[in-house]
Image (cartoon, rainbow, N blue to C red):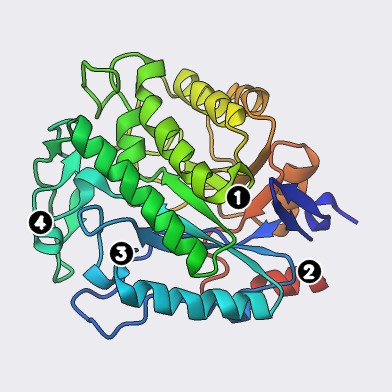
Amino acid sequence: MPKLFSPLDAGELALSHRLVLPGLVQLHEMGNASLRIPKFDYARRATPQGLIISEPCYVSLTGSADAPHSCGAHPEWLREWRRATDAVHSNGGLIVAQLCHVGRLAHSSITGRRPVGPSTRSARCTVRSFHGRWVEAEVPQALDQDGIDSVIAEYQSTAIRAVSAGFDGVELNSADGYLPNQFLDDVVNDRVDRYGGTIRNRTIFISEVVHALVQVCGAGRVGVRLSPYSEYNDAQDSAPLALYAAVLQELCDQEVAYVHLVRSDRRGKILGHNPFDDPLAERTFRAAFSGAILVSGEFTKDLAIASVESRWADAIGFGTSWIDDPDFVRRLLDE
């Protein structure tokens, strides 16, 4: 039997197979307060001890790219996700909450205030407004120490709500040009305090957020999503190999359950089966992180098997294949 279909312990998440349904950045229709928060039928997509990563769960309205009720602080969020997690568990599956703060990608028509970020550099891309129109990104306000502490507290309080909603763990979205990604990348982060400048300093924010999540869930139920070579939402770094090797080493030291590596183009489309062009990336990243590595992309079954057999990836996220085909993973397991 190929290793892809064998069990995997990702921290405290005991999986019966290595086919993962990755959380995608899906924007709901705006301004529809009656819209159910979980967009997909998670119950039908659940498999016994198979892992699902939720669509974005925003930690605050300030950090949201969606309608207000999609935020973790909104009562409807808790009720709707409890229904979804109960349904996944009834089919024997596991589900973790993808915790998101979009930082400078937020728009004041949604949040009611100026977006925030590590600096005042606006994103060179369009963002979603409340009515669903794509508009130019606004100039963000640089977070001071009190603001950073407040955001970290929002991540932690949303993790607490996620646990109470029945999630089996959380995944910090530090990819996709979102706020933790903005702190990492030197093209965005021009700070001169302890959160900016050197690679070590630029990893402090993500390290502090992960520490706050570990206090709630335990390290074995925290995953981290990264996109080292993505250009989505104007997220770039001048030395991604060195930066993300340092990030992965820090996450290894914190003993998180897994890291989730993705690659997207400028429009957010997931690219290819191998997320990195740099030939040193696979060896460098694997050496830096000894835990479970989940790699997402537009995989075929054969490419997924080969990637796991080569030990580049411990588990595979199948891009968008599962969205229109809720039986996608179940069918692969039955073949």
CB atoms at circles 3 and 1 under 8 Å apart? no
Which callout, 4 or 1, points to the residue nearer the camera? 1
Q: Quadrant of residue 240?
A: top left
The residue that mark 3 highlights is 73
Question: Could you say where residue 323 lies in the image, as x and y percent from the top left?
Answer: 51, 72
| Mark toward the viewer: 4 or 2 | 4
Going 25% across and 43% down the picture, which residue do you hit?
150
Which quarter of the figure is the C terminus placed in? Answer: bottom right
User: How far apart, in angstroms, are the residues tagged by discs 2 and 3?
Assistant: 37 Å
Disc 4 or 3, which lies upstream in sequence?
3
Q: Residue 221: which disc?
A: 1
Mark 1 surroundings within 10 Å by alpha-carbon count, few (fewer than 14), some (14 through 19), many (20 or more): many
Q: Is residue 325 visible?
A: no
Count of number-bearing discs: 4
Q: Which mark is residue 333?
A: 2
Sequence-earlier tag: 2 or 3: 3
* Mark closest to the chain's N terminus, 3 or 1: 3
User: Is 282 placed left or right of 147 in the picture?
Assistant: right
Q: Earlier in the sequence, mark 4 or mark 1?
A: 4
- As displayed, is residue 183 above or below residue 176? above
User: Dot 4 corresponds to which residue?
Assistant: 108
